[in-house]
Image (spheres, coloured by chain):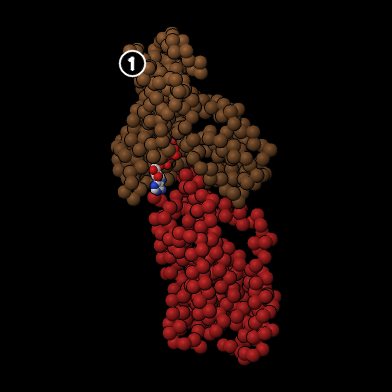
Chain colours: A red, B brown
Amino acid sequence: MIEIHVPGFFQRVFSIFLRHQKCYCKHLFSNGFPPFVEPIVFLAAIGIGLGRHIDNIAGMKYSQFVASGLVASTAMFTATFELTYGTYVRMEFENIYDSILSTPISIFDAFLGEILWAGAKGFFFSSAVLLVISLLGFVNSPFCVFAPFIGGATAVIYGALALIITSWVKDINTFNFYITGCCTPMFFLSGIILPINELPIIFQKISYFIPLTHSVNIIRSLLLGSFSYSVFYDIIFLAVFMPLCVSLAILCIKKRLIV
Amino acid sequence: MAQIVIKAKNLSKSYNGFNSVNGIDFEVESSQCFGFLGPNGAGKTTTMKMIYCLSPITEGELKIYDMTPEKCAAKIKSIIGVVPQDNNLDPQLTVGENLVIYARFFGLPPNLYKPRIKELISFMELDKKMDSPIRELSGGMKRRLVILRALLHNPRILILDEPTTGLDPQVRHLIWEKLRELKSSGVTMLLTTHYLEEASQLCDQLVIMDKGRILMAGNPHKLVAEHLSKYVMELSLNGNLCADQFRFDRPKCYTEVYGSRCYVYSDSEQFLSLTAEEFNLESKLIRNSTLEDLFLKLTGRGLSQ
Ligand SMILES: Nc1ncnc2c1ncn2[C@@H]1O[C@H](COP(=O)(O)OP(=O)(O)OP(=O)(O)O)[C@@H](O)[C@H]1O
Ligand SMILES: [Mg+2]
């Protein structure tokens, strides 16, 4: 019988990760620009404009309140774009997956690698925002160094959710419904702009099922260094939701690609 | 006896009820070049995709070195090099990066893939393009790069789905030479092509498929010898010439007419030239019958769809 060398699981997943990282880093300046500049623009607008009309919220300045939320939302958006438009283009226009899947890489390896890449991007984006807002003086606690990890987890979850959408989208414009119709409302309902307890009761209930809400809660606690028991539930929510989303996402994309 | 590398039994594939491959059987021996011929839509690419585990089989049995695609996909894919029908290079990466990333997918370490890339890239005469983005390559260069990519991990089985489409004659001959070399070093090859000359040059065995079934199987030269007369005269029919004139009283020949072209087959070259003289044919061509004639005879000279 012949001798066959098959690369190990981690090696396979990492090789996919590497491919995405290589593509991303080719345009490092233009790709790395948004997470540093976006929070500045956003906070300048809020701080100079809106902030003057609002008193302290939850014991902090309004711009500080928003700033801590941005660390999470930036991870959500970057992962969402990567696994909607990014994946769709690779799948339908560039046929990347055909070439990947004719190597020892399985569909599970390929998309796990892709979701982890989204997670890494989320980590990087969260770190960038964190850096900017700590220079602006919005961070009070050394626990903030853990915030990018929550950003990464958020990106993994939103990457997986995006992949589920991508697995049944037939036309690239359909993503508008998901991004404008789902992600933008999630942004507004997750306690970034307004504290959850000031929302109408029905939205409060909905917000509990939005992963971003929990990420925002955890990150805000880390940045301020003040923890309540609810953070514990937030962590559990993310920890349970993440593997569920990832498995479902890979199942869905497998159905789409393997015919 | 040579080892059987690929064995298919009643292999079938259907896409939503449409049978693309309809119960085919074949066996490929070690270091053989095995051809799949057939008109567009015959099911050649589908068969190949089942072999390299991209497309799950619907029915039947498929074994590659005694491994089945359901159970051992990663192992099977590690020993197969694939040249797909459509180039699927990574447009975001340069030529060199494409190769490095692809080698990584096979788990090759840098000390293995670096010299390998260097050797192959100069063989394919792409060294000057190492740092070019994919979009700056010509169609033929892309094709060469895809072939090169399939060879990176020293595959034992090479799947070539129309490998030389779009290549200039020099490069095509170069690639044929390389393929022969690979074959003699023990690589088993599966080849589809629409160039019948390529098939008769390279293939030891081939099947002619149509509509998901195998019409004929065997060695190309033997098939031609068995099923066709040795010579054929090609001529175009014009006003004062009628095909029926050839059909009657000539038991030693066989005539086919397609539109205004007429093909007269015979085992005697002399007979054909006498006939040509008799009818005062000027624009005639007498040649050996080829695989192409057999292919067209089997699958019809018109478009079947
Ligand atoms: N993904 C798919 N979904 C549905 N039908 C498909 C799919 N892929 C191929 N087919 C159908 O299967 C049949 C065989 O296709 P295949 O690509 O195997 O042909 P082929 O022999 O490679 O033809 P060509 O010479 O044009 O490459 C065709 O009728 C095609 O329409
Ligand atoms: Mg084909």
Which percent across, then down, holds residue A60? Answer: 61, 86
Amino acid on which the number 1 mark rests in the picture: Phe
Q: Is residue B7 visible?
A: no
Task: Give whichever of A177, A230 is nearer the camera.
Answer: A177
Task: Give whichever of B263, A34 is nearer the camera.
Answer: B263
Location of residue B209 by image quarter: top left
Helix, strand or loop status at disc 1: loop
Task: Give whichever of B49, A100 is nearer the camera.
Answer: B49
Q: Residue at x 51, y 88 (%)?
A: A198
Q: Chain of mark 1?
A: B
Q: Is residue A248 above or below residue B127?
A: below
Q: Is residue B204 above or below residue A218?
A: above
Q: Is residue B52 above or below residue A123?
A: above
Which percent across, then down, holds residue B57? Answer: 34, 44
Q: Residue at x 45, y 23 (%)?
A: B239
Question: Which residue position holds label 1?
Answer: B248
For this orientation, the residue located farthest to the front is: B240
Q: Left of A244 or right of it: where is A185?
A: right
Which percent across, then down, holds residue A162? Answer: 48, 64
Q: Quadrant of the N terminus of chain B?
A: top left
